[in-house]
Image (cartoon, grey):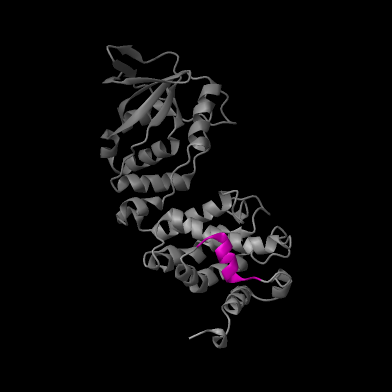
Amino acid sequence: MVKIETSYLEFKFSNITSYIFKMKVKDVISVHYVAVRGKDSEDGAVQRVLNSQRVKQIKEFVLRGNSFFNTFILNWSNENDSPSFNNQQIHLPIVKSSAQIIDGQHRLAGLNEAMKEDSCIGEKEIVVALCIKLSMKDAASIFVNINSEQKPVPKSLIYDLFGEFELDKDHYINRAHDIATELNENVDSPYYRSIRFPGSTRGVGSVDLSTIVNSLKKAVSKGGELEKVGIIELQMQKVVILNFFKAIKSCYDEENLWEKTTRNPFLSNAGFVGAIDFFTQKLLAKCVDKKTFKVEDIKAIINLPKGNLLEKKALKDKDGKTQRKEIFNHLEYYMLNKIGSVNEFQF
């Protein structure tokens, strides 16, 4: 039987002990297996069914020369051949299907696929946190902690931290997706749980994710409207777009219309696109000039009239392009009306 011998660090989190050390990719792939919840009855079965598209993306990521800094978590379940410990050394038998993967199943699957094309990948080392014979409760506790309590940072944050580089060629798409996610998950967002992501239950959401990404990607791209006025960082871009829609929502809330999807035109694809077109082409420069993106200041600038708000019935039987234009014109009209005519200016 083949065994590896390496030094380790022992950590105890709550009542769970783990042993942290390095292993070659090929050895981890050999000893690990996936216990799927709802399918396998053994303790520690917490994993989901593999997403083939995600595995493919990870494979390509690895074949480009990348590796992983985060830990792979294993639960040793083999009753017959167990690791032994001596003088801060772990002696680990390389026996097929001896350890459940608790975290990292997609990364390991991607590594495995990449190794089929480049055997050198199997010789690379990754960091493993090994637990021994976890109960289902403890395995689930670890899985939930990683997948719900610890949220991954937005992909486009790479741009803010390091600037653009080779791996971030899709920065503007990632950034638009990150903003859409914020709009959907922020409880203070006018679009909270109102965006249709791929795989959403039928009837859930009012605006498609693809619509939001397509309408935002030009504004958030390198050299786009937001960068031109110095609004470059993700958090700043989230805030200005969120505050813009909060200002519109505030006007519709005064007449109890925002939540009424049959009447509120902004809870539609055309409404969102028309609003973003107005924001980037007209409102953005006005806010920069006034040096404010506060909700109350944006509300004052757009100046939507109580009792004469645009509703969906005014857009009935019109195609999407015409609806977007109508929404743009409605917002622009009242903003210009607020500015006043040239005869009212003092020179």
The image quadrant of residue 208 is: bottom right
Q: Which residues make up the magenta segment?
A: 293-304
Q: Nearer the viewer, residue 170 or 287?
A: 287
Q: Position of residue 199 (x, y in %)?
A: 59, 50
Residue 253: in magenta span: no
Q: Position of residue 138 (x, y in %)?
A: 52, 22
In this rendering, position of residue 293 left or right of residue 315:
left
Outermost residue, top side: 86
Residue beneath the point at 31% across and 55% down: 163
In this rendering, position of residue 152 left or right of residue 294:
left
Is the N terminus in the top left, top right, bottom left or bottom right quadrant?
Answer: top left
The image quadrant of residue 326 is: bottom right
Q: Is residue 178 above or below residue 41?
A: below
In this rendering, position of residue 296 left or right of residue 59:
right
Q: Nearer the viewer, residue 46 or 34?
A: 46
In this rendering, position of residue 121 left or right of residue 46:
left
Q: Position of residue 140 (x, y in %)?
A: 54, 27
Residue beneath the point at 53% across and 60% down: 294
Residue 296: in magenta span: yes
Q: Magenta segment, principal secondary structure?
A: helix
Residue beneath the point at 44% across and 35% down: 105
Say whether residue 286 is visible.
yes
Say whether residue 267 is visible.
no
Outermost residue, front side: 346
Q: Is residue 103 above or below residue 223?
A: above
How many badges with numbers are in the image?
A: 0
Q: Nearer the viewer, residue 58 or 272?
A: 272
The image quadrant of residue 212 is: bottom right
Q: Is residue 208 above or below residue 116?
A: below
Q: Position of residue 288 (x, y in %)?
A: 45, 68
